[in-house]
């Protein structure tokens, strides 16, 4: 009875933590969507928009390499395990050493990045020429130091997550988005696109500093002060560093895939890069809200699992399967909504100012291509987190390499030769990029699952569970499409409300009627919240 109660408590705590992560991510993503809507209003799919998107992508490479994902895989398992063993002094020393090493290495890379910006532009967006290329170079040099600050923010996130302070760490990016929104709101109506893009880059740097500033006081309080050192020979620090490099390379490999997309898109007509970025923002919303939320909440819990090999495997298997169900429950309707009702969603977010209805249909086509791999890439995040909890960072690296090779080969064919062969407009090659990335994501997912199953036992989603989710999502989408088709003409945002509202209601009510446990739990939480409010 004691073990059952403990398991129930752990499951309940995990769901609460996942909810906090999802709530934080939701707020930051909503802020990001508002930022993108304001950006679309002032820049549309212009050459300046292409330059800014490329510029933001390059320093983000640094953030993604040194930032949240890598630290989550290498630092949190070690730090969280020390906390679980109540060795707080060693945890504090390890955190200080990691912070010092991270700050030193990031500073060096930022310096070289600023000096070598023209070569970076030529390497990843060779199709940019003239004023667009020169603007991208100038923007990158402004943005690079700011993204260096965001790497420190990712270290703060690692500390906060390990102490189960999820909400603050994932809402902090709201401030970064707010700084950019404020910049465009203040200067957008009285500046040229060129000037506004420069001001926006400086606004991004200011937002990065503020994002670190709101987290640091809480982090310092949790640590009891910060003791910076370069004690890289300490056992726990060596473990973090040893785990860091495979994940660093793995993230680098995945980022290469993103850069290949940008490189190929730079050879397509003007607006292709900006449209791809708009679609990716929407595509990443469910990945972040559900895949990242569950994975971030589970990683410290999995990393703190104690016992013999069989007991640890059983704990990981149970947590993984429960997490997969939570992810699929929300991602399946996201896939169907993007595919069938994507024009409504894109229009509600971006249809304003310089962003036309033709642009809406263009981004919808790219987003529809991205749905091919949405479920696989989201579930794959949780599988990767399970490997990281086992201190295995090399297996996900091998499969990430396979994914990138496939993405590169298929992406080139689908983006450039295939549109010509089919006699369609060259700009639709961007949709080919998202489709090819989706195919590669499924290959990576199956490799991750097959190998992990051999190690901890059978994991995955039951076929009948998936069938219920897909069936209700399609029924709900059919109702939403009928409302869209026969409900009259409405402006983008009201249209989204009258179409997506019933879509969500039918899906959640239908899954509840079919006995889906996640739906029952969701309605139960809503009922309890309602009773508490009264």
Image (tube, rainbow, N blue to C red):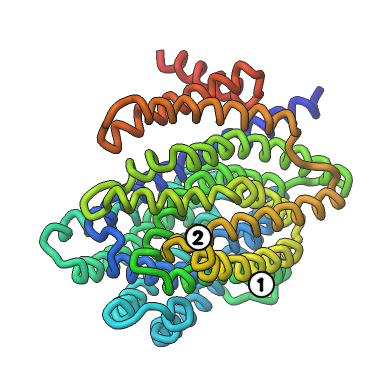
Which image quadrant: the N terminus?
top right
* Disc 2 packing (10 Å; few <14; some 14–19; many ≥20): many
Image vertical order of residue 260 relative to residue 361, above or below: below
Q: Earlier in the sequence, mark 1 or mark 2?
A: 2
Where 94 sits versus 487, above or below?
below
Residue placed at 41% from the left, 47% from the top?
29
Q: In the visual, does 455 lie left or right of 305?
A: right
Secondary structure under tag 2 reads helix
Rendered image quadrant of residue 138? bottom left
Q: Quadrant of the image for the C terminus?
A: top left
List the residue tagged with mark 1.
Answer: 245
Location of residue 93 in the rendering, given as x and y in whole percent from the top left corner = 61, 65
Residue in front for this viewpoint, 193 or 315: 193
Q: Quadrant of residue 274?
A: bottom left
* Residue at x 83% of width, y 48% of height: 453
Q: For marks 1 and 2, give the CA distance.
A: 17 Å
How many marks do you count on the picture? 2
Comparing 229 with 283, the one in front is 283
Return the residue found at the far left: 190
Residue at image mark 2:
154
Image-based side of 473 in relation to 247, left or right: left
Residue 79, image x and y in percent?
65, 57
Label 1 crowd (10 A; few <14 / some 14-19 / many >=20): some
């Amino acid at each position: 009875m004691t073990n059952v109660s403990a398991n129930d408590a752990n499951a309940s705590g995990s769901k609460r933590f996942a909810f906090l992560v999802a709530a934080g991510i939701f707020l930051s993503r909503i802020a990001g969507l508002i930022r993108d809507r304001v950006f679309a209003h002032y820049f549309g799919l212009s050459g300046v928009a292409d330059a800014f998107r490329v510029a933001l992508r390059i320093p983000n490479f640094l953030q993604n390499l040194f930032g949240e994902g890598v630290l989550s895989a290498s630092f949190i398992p070690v730090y969280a395990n020390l906390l679980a063993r109540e060795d707080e002094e060693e945890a504090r020393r390890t955190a200080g050493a990691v912070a010092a090493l991270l700050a030193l290495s990031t500073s060096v890379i930022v310096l070289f990045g600023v000096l070598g910006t023209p070569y970076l532009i030529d390497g990843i967006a060779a199709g940019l020429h003239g004023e667009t290329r020169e603007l991208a170079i100038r923007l990158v040099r402004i943005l690079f130091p700011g993204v260096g600050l965001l790497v420190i923010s990712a270290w703060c996130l690692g500390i906060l997550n390990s102490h189960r302070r999820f909400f603050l760490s994932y809402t902090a990016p709201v401030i970064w988005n707010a700084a950019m929104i404020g910049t465009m709101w203040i200067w957008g109506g009285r500046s040229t696109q060129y000037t506004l893009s420069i001001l926006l880059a400086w606004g991004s740097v200011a937002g990065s500093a503020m994002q670190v500033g709101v987290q640091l006081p809480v982090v310092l309080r949790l640590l009891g002060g910060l003791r910076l050192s370069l004690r890289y020979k300490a056992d726990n620090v060596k473990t973090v560093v040893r785990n860091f490099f495979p994940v660093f390379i793995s993230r680098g490999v995945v980022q290469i895939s993103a850069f290949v997309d940008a490189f190929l898109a730079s050879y397509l007509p003007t607006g292709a890069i900006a449209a791809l970025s708009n679609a990716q923002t929407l595509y990443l919303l469910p990945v972040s809200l559900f895949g990242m939320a569950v994975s971030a909440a589970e990683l410290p819990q999995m990393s703190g699992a104690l016992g013999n090999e069989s007991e640890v495997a059983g704990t990981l298997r149970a947590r993984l399967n429960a997490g997969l169900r939570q992810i699929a429950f929300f991602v399946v309707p996201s896939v169907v909504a993007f595919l069938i009702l994507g024009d409504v969603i894109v229009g509600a977010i971006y249809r304003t100012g310089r962003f036309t209805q033709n642009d809406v249909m263009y981004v919808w086509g790219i987003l529809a291509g991205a749905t091919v791999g949405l479920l696989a890439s989201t579930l794959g995040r949780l599988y990767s987190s399970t490997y990281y909890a086992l201190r295995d960072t090399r297996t996900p690296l091998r499969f990430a390499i396979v994914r990138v090779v496939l993405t590169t080969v298929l992406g080139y064919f689908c983006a450039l030769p295939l549109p010509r062969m089919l006699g369609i407009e060259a700009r639709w090659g961007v949709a080919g990029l998202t489709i090819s990335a989706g195919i590669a994501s499924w290959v990576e997912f199956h490799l991750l699952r097959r190998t992990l199953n051999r190690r901890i036992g059978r994991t995955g989603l039951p076929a009948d569970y998936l069938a219920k989710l897909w069936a209700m999502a399609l029924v709900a989408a059919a109702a939403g499409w009928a409302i869209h088709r026969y409900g009259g003409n409405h402006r983008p945002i009201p249209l989204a409300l009258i179409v997506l509202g019933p879509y969500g209601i039918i899906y959640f009510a239908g899954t509840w009627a079919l006995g889906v446990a996640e739906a029952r739990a969701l309605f139960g939480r809503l009922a309890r919240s309602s009773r508490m409010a009264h």
